[in-house]
Amino acid sequence: MKLYPLLLVFVLLGFQNAYGEEPKKQNFKETLSSFIKEAKSKNPEISEGKNRINIFKEIPPQAGSLKDPELMLGLVNLPVDSFSFRQEAMTQKQIQVSQKFPFPGTLSLRVQAADQDVSIAKANHDDVILKIVREVKTTFYELFYINSTIEITRQNKVLMKQFITIAEGKYSVGKGIQQDVLKAQVELSKIMDELIELNQLKQAESAKLNVLMNRLPQAELNIPHGLIQSPFKFKLEKLQKMAENKRPFLKAIKSSIDKFKIKKQLAEKKYYPDFNVSLRYGQRQDSMVASHPDFVSAFVGINIPIWHKTKQSRKVLEENFRIQTFRDVYNKAKNQIFLAIKIALDKEAKGSKLIKLIKSGIIPQARQSLESALAAYSVDKVDFLTLIDNQVTLLKWEIKYHRELTDYEQNLAMLENLVGKELF
């Protein structure tokens, strides 16, 4: 067959770019970094978090301020028979200023509690950034997988057309059967159907990535080739310790615990009285027969916490239970994160072995099997179905390799999110 040498060359070389893309790694990483940078600066969820921090930053000055003073004006002892300010010696025009003062130390504790809310908002904002970065990476990697699968499938489409040409050539000279031609045409139709589905998936993932960067969903995206397996040298205990110290979500819970500790101190302050200080000035008018000096009065009032058993003491207990609750929340969250890290490391170990096995073992064997079947088919030593089966097997393992590589990198992106720090 004259087409056989050309087809054999295609089989030998047509799939090499499926995972021989290391020279393009730099461009791949640069593109991913630029997408992450754009998402950090433009994603509305991140922007919302920044504004939320600014909201909470305005609260501590308010919490540390005294209540507004009260000004009171009044007329005292004005006779109703004449409404004269000179008739009675005790008739006064009064002005009074009063100010409430909480027990010493209360205002500073309120400021500290409000500062913890700022810390919580910052930690939550940092955790949102980690989440967005993870989503950008996983979506970017998924698009790489889809693009690679599309490319492999297109190559197989060309290869299947070559198979059809060979089958038709054999059938035309009486060396083949029509069933071989029909079988190849069915496989070609399957490939075309897969390409339609893959392109639909590509549009969906592209839209998702665009939205993460606050672009229009339909904006064009250029996802380069060049994804290679990231080196991994981390130990479980080190990653768990890193998560305990770095993960913003855990920091937010710690700040909540600190906040309720301060709230408990505030509740204990309520055992002591607050003060209400007033200064009053009474102006009198001289009568026809006598002069009347003005009056100055001062008052200090306090609240008496006599219902402390059902009020203040209960509030202290309430805040104490909040502290205990959030300690449990922290331990639960830490345990869940530690477990997720353990699962991610198990996936990493499994994925690394599987990637190596597929790349270095299964795919070369599948390619050799296809080459052997092609050579045997050209001299009528195997049937056409065997050739097709070998071609489909190679296709599946090529796609499987990129699926495992993508899953591996997506798992590492999740691991970065778990520990709260960029690792790769």
Image: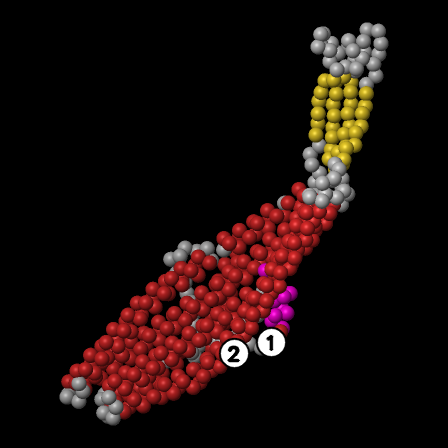
**Figure quadrant of the C terminus:** bottom right
The image shows residue 95 at horizontal and vertical percentages of 74, 23
Prevailing SS of the magenta stretch: helix
Name the one closer to the observer, 251 or 23: 251
* Residue 23 appears in the figure: no
Q: Residues within 10 Å of mark 1 (few under 14, many from 20)?
A: few
The image shows residue 373 at horizontal and vertical percentages of 29, 89
Q: Say the numbered circle drawn on residue 36.
A: none
- Which amino acid does the dot numbered 2 rest on? Ala
Segment tinted magenta in the rendering:
238-249
Q: Which residue is mark 1?
A: 235
> Per the image, is 242 magenta?
yes
Q: Is residue 19 above or below residue 297?
A: below
User: Residue 234 appears in which quarter of the rendering?
Assistant: bottom right
Disc 1 on helix, strand or loop?
A: loop
Q: Which residue is mark 2?
A: 349
Asked whether, in this view, residue 195 is left or right of residue 39, the answer is left
